[in-house]
Amino acid sequence: MIIVGFKATATQADRQAAIDSINGTVVGGQPMPPGEGFYFVRLEAARRLEPLTRAVTKLWSLPQVASASLVTPLEEQFRRPR
């Protein structure tokens, strides 16, 4: 899983373009005032690290992205309700 933060100037179209550029799916988020907060993004990486690290590198290269990093989805906030 990747956590992504966008610059305050990023539009919704900018954000979607960034997620689409890595073939990601937004599966959640964490609101953080005063902006939108962070997006939790899943990739189909077949349990391999390389596609995830490439996606983070790609996100960092985009002007609308403020932060991007890998996370381990162990915390309660990442789990979907059943």
Image: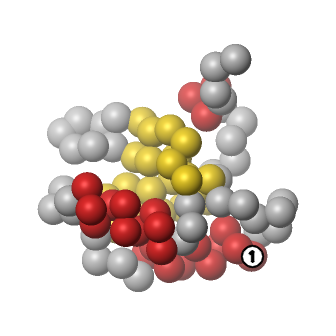
**Image position of 34 with respect to 20: above or below:** above
The residue under label 1 is: 50
48 on left or right of 78: right
Please report the residue visible at 15 percent of the width from the left and 62 percent of the height from the top: 9
> The C terminus lies in which quarter of the figure?
top right
x and y percentages locating residue 69 in the rendered image: 54, 61
Of residue 72 and residue 54, the one placed in the foreground of this image is 54
Residue 36 visible in the shown view: yes
x and y percentages locating residue 23 in the rendered image: 57, 67
Please report the residue visible at 25 percent of the width from the left and 55 percent of the height from the top: 12
x and y percentages locating residue 43 in the rendered image: 65, 60
x and y percentages locating residue 38 in the rendered image: 40, 46
19 on left or right of 62: right
Quadrant of res 34: top left
**Disc 1 element:** helix
Amino acid type of the residue that numbered disc 1 sits on in the rendered structure? Glu
**Image position of 76 with respect to 68: above or below:** above
63 on left or right of 30: left
Mark 1 nearby-residue class (10 Å; few <14, some 14–19, many ≥20): few
Please report the residue visible at 51 percent of the width from the left and 48 percent of the height from the top: 26
Residue 56 visible in the shown view: no
Quadrant of res 37: top left
